[in-house]
Image (cartoon, rainbow, N blue to C red):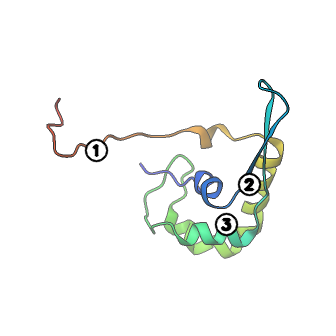
Amino acid sequence: MASINIFPKLVKSHLKIYWLFEDTHNKQYFLETIEPYQVIEIASKLKPKISSGHDEISSKLLKETIEYIKYPLTHIINRSLLMGIVPNQMKIGEVIPIYKACDPTD
């Protein structure tokens, strides 16, 4: 089951992270909010798969509806960034090891 989580891709490719060092024990960072065009840009790079993840939304559906949901989705992402709250469903990850050039039973 694949999950469609565009948050890591947005953080990696579109958000600038600023570090403020007041002392060695107190660190803060700020994430810039995003714009609808950035959400569209990331969604357009997704592979159009019909499988869905924990959110029950396929990348194909997301790509087909992104023009209609870009403003609400941008608002949700920005509120999450500004409030520092990430929904529990977005914290779920699935790691599947892929064996190459060795015996998978080792």
Quarter holding residue 50? bottom left
Under mark 2, the amino acid is Ile
CA distance for labels 2 and 3: 9 Å
Mark 1 lies on residue: 98
Mark 3 lies on residue: 39
For image coordinates 17% across by 29% down, the residue present is: 106
Q: Secondary structure at mark 1?
A: loop
Q: What x and y, as percent, mark residue 103?
A: 14, 37
For image coordinates 32% across by 40% down, the residue present is: 97
| Mark earlier in primary sequence (1, 2) | 2
Outermost residue toward the left in this view: 103
| Mark earlier in primary sequence (1, 3) | 3
Q: What x and y, as percent, mark residue 35?
A: 76, 67
Q: Nearer the viewer, mark 1 or mark 2?
A: 1
Mark 2 lies on residue: 77
In this view, 52 is above or below 106: below
| Mark earlier in primary sequence (2, 3) | 3
Quarter holding residue 16? bottom right
- The 10 Å Cα crowd at callout 1, few under 14, some 14 to 19, many 20 or more, is few
- The 10 Å Cα crowd at callout 2, few under 14, some 14 to 19, many 20 or more, is many
CA distance for labels 1 and 3: 30 Å
